[in-house]
Image: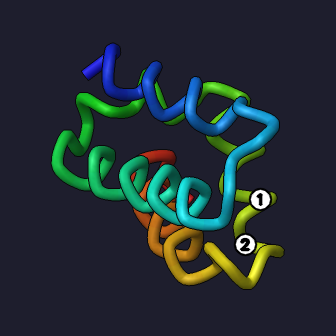
Amino acid sequence: AQGIFEFIRICWSDQHKNDAVKRAAVGALGDLAHCLEANAKPFVRQDWVRQMISQCVKDKSCKENAKWAKQVVDSLSGK
């Protein structure tokens, strides 16, 4: 799982990413966290995860996927 989270982080950090990449990255993050449940906790606690979700929640191109990812991450964090 670490490799997949790292791939998502690398995709997200690309300064030239387009809306489709943003949408796919945050969606994959939510899906992966959902599938891994408690095993995803160490990965979703990383700062870049919250930053990505926060940025996407404000961006109409990836807002819906970000809401899903936020819900999953928050449930793993006990929020």
The residue drawn where x is 29% and y is 56% is 31
12 above or below 4?
below
> Residue 7 appears at what percent x and percent y?
43, 25
Q: Quadrant of the C terminus?
A: bottom right
- Which disc number belongs to residue 63? none
- Considering depth in this image, is 8 or 79 the residue closer to the camera? 8
> Residue 26 appears at what percent x and percent y?
52, 56
Residue contact between numbered discs 2 and 1, judged by CB atoms under 8 Å: yes
Quadrant hosting residue 21? bottom right
Q: Residues within 10 Å of mark 2 (few under 14, many from 20)?
A: many
Q: Residues within 10 Å of mark 1 (few under 14, many from 20)?
A: some
Residue for badge 2? 57
- What kind of residue is marked 2? Val
Residue for badge 1? 54
Q: Is residue 72 left or right of residue 3?
A: right
C-alpha separation, residue under disc 2 versus residue under disc 1 = 5 Å
Q: Is residue 52 visible?
A: yes
Mark 2, secondary structure of its residue: helix
> Residue 11 appears at what percent x and percent y?
56, 34
Q: Is residue 23 left or right of residue 61?
A: left
